[in-house]
Image (cartoon, rainbow, N blue to C red):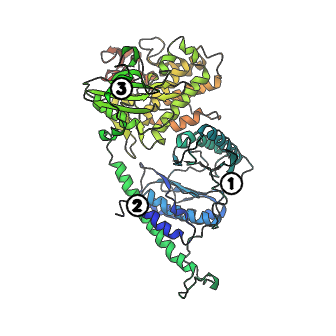
Amino acid sequence: MFFLFPHTLIFFSLSSLSALLYTPVSAQLPEFSCSTTSNYTTNSAFETNLNLLLSSLSSNASRSGFFNDTSGDDPDRVYGLVLCRGDATPDRCQSCATIASQGVIQACPSSKNGTIWYIYCMLRYSNVRFFSALDNSTVRYEGNAQNVSDPDHFNQVLIGVMSNISEAAASGNSTRMFATGDGNLTSVQRVYGLVQCTEDLSRSDCNLCLRSAIADIPTCCDGKQGGKVLRLSCNLRFEIYPFFDELDNAGPAPPLPSTTATAAAPASATAAGSSGISYRTIILIVVPVVVGMALVFSTVYIFLQRRKAKTKMIDGPDIGEMDSLQFDLVTIRAATNNFSDANKLGQGGFGAVYKGRLDDQEIAVKRLFRNTKDGLEEFKNEVVLVAKLQHRNLVRLLGCCLDGDEQILIFEYVPNKSLEKFLHDPTKRACLDWERRYKIIGGIARGLLYLHEDSRLKIIHRDLKASNILLDGEMNAKISDFGTAKLFEVGQTQGNTSRITGTYGYMSPEYAMHGKFSIKSDVFSFGVLLLEIVSGLKSYAFYQSDLAQDLPSYAWRHWTEGTVSELIDPTLRECCPRNEALKCIHIGLLCVQEHVTDRPTMSSVVQMLSNEPINLPSPLPPVFSMVSRANTNTASGDCDSPTSNKSESRLFIPWTVNEISSTEFDPR
């Protein structure tokens, strides 16, 4: 029974202790992040150095609330830091750091990189030097379960408060890079905020990190009464009650018991009664026991959760998960006027999309083609994945219908249809001024970041393109069509497939050639899409052209010839911020680089797209620009497309694969 309900057991044990003294930081289940690709072995030099480092961090934390140190020599050197919350007392800081040094080992066994967050402190270690470097690669969220009554007003006040205290924390007046503040929600209610950066950051990097954290609030806890955004270099928290400074009336948490303490308790500290046992003695006995129990069962719980995640299969979605989303076929037929052609919005590789109405809500109904070989798997895949995703830049699934041969998905209706409809229509393109295009680019980037890093699932989309980006009434981008998406296991970084599905002009070379896909495959597609949005050119419009073989090659040619401005859509050149447009082209070229490791992650891309000035690395040539046009011929397949033969010691044959999708009208 203990193993079935670890949360309950830990809560019971710690609640018993709280009757005697202030609840310690160990009572809070921590957030943690561990590397799954770099591990050390038991009794190794690295493990020895790590233990020495953790001891140093925990013993020095209370001096100033921030301490970083290293232990050992390369290649087994370990780097680490501990950061206590700016309002934590020295005793509370010391207690939290000690618990964190134990907890991170339990949470990240054998990992060479680990971070753990408690309420009053965070502790981080790595085999790579990270001091003074802004790191937005890892984000953890925690939102309050309770919603606010007026989200728009709440968000307006909240963002104002968080922005003000972020500026204060990053200013020269804050020695700890820590600030708190509050703002009026109503005449009787306020919202309270707290922000903090690691103290080794520069002021500008602190400001950039906190800006990114504030931008995560809608993803983390939109409309919630409280929440936390935890990054490696900074963190923030907000609540509708004062949670900092005077957190309780019990005073600071007591320090952990010291084995060197020998002073007897004074008579006044003795408990009433004839036993003569002092409160200090009780604490010395109970604290280690309860903390030990909590650590043991936390370890068991973490182990079971990790094992459960690792054994979860990717390609077998459970149809039972769809029961709560089921609509009956009669209702769907009535909503679409029996799938009338007048309501048809478009058609893709796996089905047609119809506009419909359920009660007072407009819907988009995706009806998959019957008797397709992979239709049922695609249907189950999309339902199970999209139903678990909630982000403003992803299209929202409302339900499904599985009735005989009918496989139907019901989505929110997005009135402006697809980005492709605007981008490549001479009349509608005029509606896409630079401000809207930049907003769309940012929305796509944040949606992909959510899929790759910020959701509780790690998802590779595999078919990112202009026709799969929908635009709502306010021209917000929404990524759609998850039929070919792949769910990664915990710790998985790459997948392989013999069934290559994608779209001409957007697929990364390693995926098209070898069937290897990863988050960097999506990054490549995003880079092509980014170049397409800035230039207004179609990604696939260059075949048998004297300009280039593809859009990345065309952009690269302008880059090397110093004529990048000519790549900007002519309708924008006179009215867009030139530096911003050129930065987007630069980012696009970084995303379409040949080697996977050279491409940035989406968290880096989001940071690059911020308005803060940042030095971008120089891009390397995209793979297509290295292929000789002299050896190009045509091959028949699912669509007419170029096939490249061996050239300059490269073999790249991306377009002879089957099952490449070609969207005729609107996204599936």
Q: Relative to 90, is 205 above or below?
A: above
- Give the camera-side residue of 547 and 84: 84
Q: In the picture, which quadrant includes the N terminus?
A: bottom left
Q: In the picture, which quadrant includes the C terminus?
A: top left
Question: What residue is pinned by disc 3?
Answer: 332
Displayed quadrant of residue 441:
top right
Extreme residue toward the bottom, this view = 274
Question: What residue is pinned by disc 1?
Answer: 176
Left or right position of 244 against 12: right
Q: In the rendering, at what x and y percent does residue 182 appear?
A: 69, 48
Give the Cα distance between marks 1 and 3. Answer: 58 Å
Q: Relative to 384, is 229 above or below?
A: below
Q: Amino acid at mark 2?
A: Pro
- Give the camera-side residue of 495 and 634: 495
Secondary structure category for the residue under label 1: loop
Q: Relative to 285, is 184 above or below?
A: above
